[in-house]
Amino acid sequence: MNRADFIIYWGGNPADCHPRHFTKYTLTPKGKHVPMGRKGRTMVLVDVRETPSVRAADIFLQVRPGKDFEVITTLRALVKNQPVDQARVAETGLTLAQLQDLVGRMKNARFGVIFFGMGLSMTRGKHMNSAAVLALVAELNAFTKFVCMPMRGHGNVTGADVVMRWTTGFPFGVNLCRGYPRFNPGEFSTVDLLVRGDNDAALILGADPGATMPQPAIDHLARIPTIVLDPKVTRTSRLARVHITTAAMGISAPGTVYRMDEIPLPLRPILQSPYPTDEVVIRRIHEQVKAKPAWLPASFKKVPCA
Amino acid sequence: MTHTVVKNATCTFCGCVCDDMELHAEGDRIVKTKLACGLGEAWFKNHTAEHLYPDALIDGQPSSVEEAVQAAADYLYEADMPLVYGLSNITCEAQRAAVALAERIGGVVDSHTSL
């Protein structure tokens, strides 16, 4: 807000999904180094279809669905003045002139930002698309200042990344089975684990995978003992063995939440819940587990010391 | 009915986490929001402090929190590879407790980020 004069939204529709993003954080506020506010900024929207966010954009680039990775790769080539194949550019739904114009604007920006949404990170290419954006932004820093940020959906999903980072060293999908953290998305990420049927119990905290995940993952959650902590009885609660109702974060549960730019903010709950908070319930479960004898594998044999 | 006002309240519906709301509550529900967007207003008004749901359910039957905590601990203790998933709609303090529990039970801890 204080610095960016060139803003790209890629694969997202903030006008509908993050309604105050433009007015509170990115476009309209007058910033320390962008005193003109909206007039001092250029906004480019990249998406596969026209959404209500188009009205807020200066330039709208409509990419053919599933061609984001190709567009980003072409941009990376153009940034480094490498030759590109005209026919392949045409397949993306954009023209070479449009992409050259975009690269020119990126390089001439004083401070650029790319916000990328699930239209990029959850479609064909998935995490490869996100990785390509990170590479593009890293390379642009040879010319000007450029950063990127994912548009986060859930309230404290950024907090989950931050807390897991400082406790285990990794942001998500952390396996502690061996007593030390291991990180391997695709192997230890939830959908993959559940679809393969690797887990033999699940503790679901403030999420409703029963309504959102692929059917094979839901089927596995119904097979194993699933425990749900949620302010409401959800679809997942109905297939779970145990459900515990908890106070809603920010409404009746106090605490800290991270904004998507990793700024921690305190909550000011207005209501008093009749239910305990998630933190209290998790700690109580932990106490109960702790009271049991330490777990050792069935095949464990004590090796005598020489 | 008691009328309470909280200024500079924080909305946790989406990742924007706007922290400039003014909330008005009467009794156990929020009746008015200032500066909240359409999504935020719906979020605030949809949650009440009423006792709408049973404290806990075991196999679909209402139970006490104490029994449910015990059952949860038993299941997690017995499991070889439990999964702790979600964490996106709970506070950082609860997330920290969840990671500690995952370490104790030797499980996998994961959030919506991996989707």
Image (cartoon, rainbow, N blue to C red):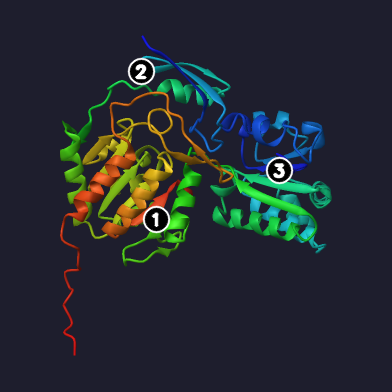
Q: Between marks 2 and 1, how big is the CA–CA gap? A: 41 Å
**How far across and how far down the image is residue A205, in percent?**
34, 42
Question: Which chain hosts label 2?
Answer: B
Relative horizontal placement of residue B28, taking residue A142 as reference (left or right): left
Whether residue A144 is situated above or below residue A113 in the rendered picture? below
Residue designated by label 2: B28
Image marks 2 and 1: residues in contact by CB distance under 8 Å: no
Q: Secondary structure at mark 1?
A: helix
Q: Secondary structure at mark 3?
A: strand
Please state, as top left, top right, bottom left or bottom right, where the N terminus of chain B lies in the image: top left
Whether residue A205 is situated above or below residue B24 in the rendered picture? below
Relative horizontal placement of residue A273, taking residue A168 as reference (left or right): left
Question: Which chain hosts label 1?
Answer: A
Residue designated by label 3: A8
Residue at 62%, 42% (x, y): give it.
A11
Residue designated by label 1: A192
* For discs 3 and 2, the disc positioned in front in the rendered view: 2
The amino acid sitting under disc 1 is Asp
Q: Between marks 3 and 2, how big is the CA–CA gap? A: 42 Å
The amino acid sitting under disc 2 is Asp
Given residues A14 and B40, the one toward you in this image is: B40
Question: In the image, are marks 3 and 2 on the same chain?
Answer: no
Residue at 65%, 54% (x, y): give it.
A133
Given residues A134 and A121, the one toward you in this image is: A134
* For discs 3 and 1, the disc positioned in front in the rendered view: 3
Question: Which chain hosts label 3?
Answer: A
Question: In the image, are marks 3 and 1 on the same chain?
Answer: yes
Residue at 50%, 22% (x, y): give it.
B41
**How far across and how far down the image is residue A92, in percent?**
70, 49
